[in-house]
Amino acid sequence: MTRPNRIPGRYRGVAVARDDGPFDEASLCARFLGREAYWKTRFLVVRPHDDADDRVALLAVARDPGDALFSPITAVELLAGPGECAVVHRPEVDTAIPSALAAVAAEVPDARAVVVQGRYEHVNFVVDADPLRVVVREVVPPHPAKLVDQARRVVDVTEDLRPLRLERAVVDLADLARRAPASHYLLPCRGGGSEVPGAAVSYLDERPEPADWTLLGCERSRQIHRWFYGRDVPRVDLCPKVDPAVAGPGALLTKCCLQQEELGEGVATGPDGETTWVSVPWGASLEHVREALRRLAALAETRGAPPWSPA
């Protein structure tokens, strides 16, 4: 049975071996069985001495137990042969990051296994890359979309998170306003630099004199408006959590200002139809986002995604 997302947890266990013999499984096993290997070596990327020869094979190896610095290889498994394995040089890619390896593999769709020579010239690989699709739903302005940016920054430096493929689902306030055309809109705050072309704009956080406006805001904004003015007004809900199912099958990361970190509501989760969603507070920290992505990965496994752990 194919194991998706086979990625070594430590690239120190991946060694490159130069060999010019045949690259079929029987020949590789015969040549490498009994050969000495360094005590950390668990995988071999086998390549010819001549770089112009593009053959490459990927082997998993076992060695005699014990604490000897070098010991004979006792078992060899061919993970991918020359017809299904590719080597890619990407100096900007940190090969310790599973999502980064999966992203490179997506550039080589014809290869089951992709060996990446990346940042610091370190080598690692992924076999049968199948990253979890995560839609990140956010409202702009401000730019860049904060939650999208935070999620990307977290994924780019996290070594123990299953491979993820982040997709933006960004809603612009001006587009939301078109759902309820008006000559005057009330927005939650001035901080984002929000504007609605062709309409007057006021900002709720400045507590302006009441006017005949439409509120572009979430439930919290509605509550604040009622507190300030004692009434409700026409409203377009901008909360990105309002319709989690907009993501479709897969996983959704979004945010909600009604979640109170102080009350232990830092990260909320739930299934909605085919969508597994996690939301963070409106002012989420990078740690909130990191925890949310971990929960999404765990929830995905409970809903049928193959379990993942470093090879």
Image (cartoon, grey):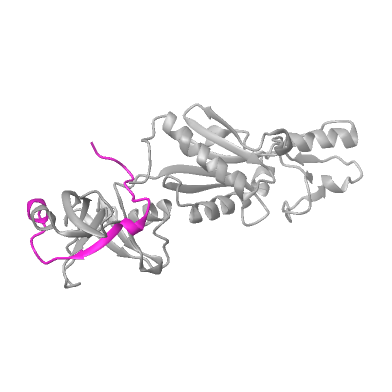
Q: Is residue 191 above or below residue 237?
A: below
Decide if residue 305 is on the left or right side of residue 232.
Answer: left
Q: Position of residue 293 (x, y in %)?
A: 52, 42
Q: Position of residue 47 (x, y in %)?
A: 19, 64
Decide if residue 54 is on the left or right side of residue 303.
Answer: left
Q: Is residue 16 magenta?
A: yes
The answer to whether any part of residue 107 appears in the image is: no
Q: Quadrant location of residue 237?
A: top right
**Which of 67 and 13 lies nearest the eye of the viewer?**
67
The number of numbered discs placed on residues in the rendered structure image is: 0
- Residue at position x 16%, y 67% in the image: 48
Q: Position of residue 39 (x, y in %)?
A: 27, 56
Q: Write the start and end of the magenta stretch as one range.
A: 1-28
**Which of 269 and 264 lies nearest the eye of the viewer?**
264
- Residue at position x 67%, y 49% in the image: 174
Q: Residue furthest right?
A: 209
The answer to whether any part of residue 126 appears in the image is: yes
Q: Is residue 178 above or below residue 242?
A: below
Q: Residue furthest front?
A: 67
Q: Is residue 168 magenta?
A: no
The N terminus lies in quadrant: top left
Q: Position of residue 291 (x, y in %)?
A: 56, 42
Decide if residue 98 is on the left or right side of residue 279.
Answer: left
Q: Quadrant location of residue 292?
A: top right
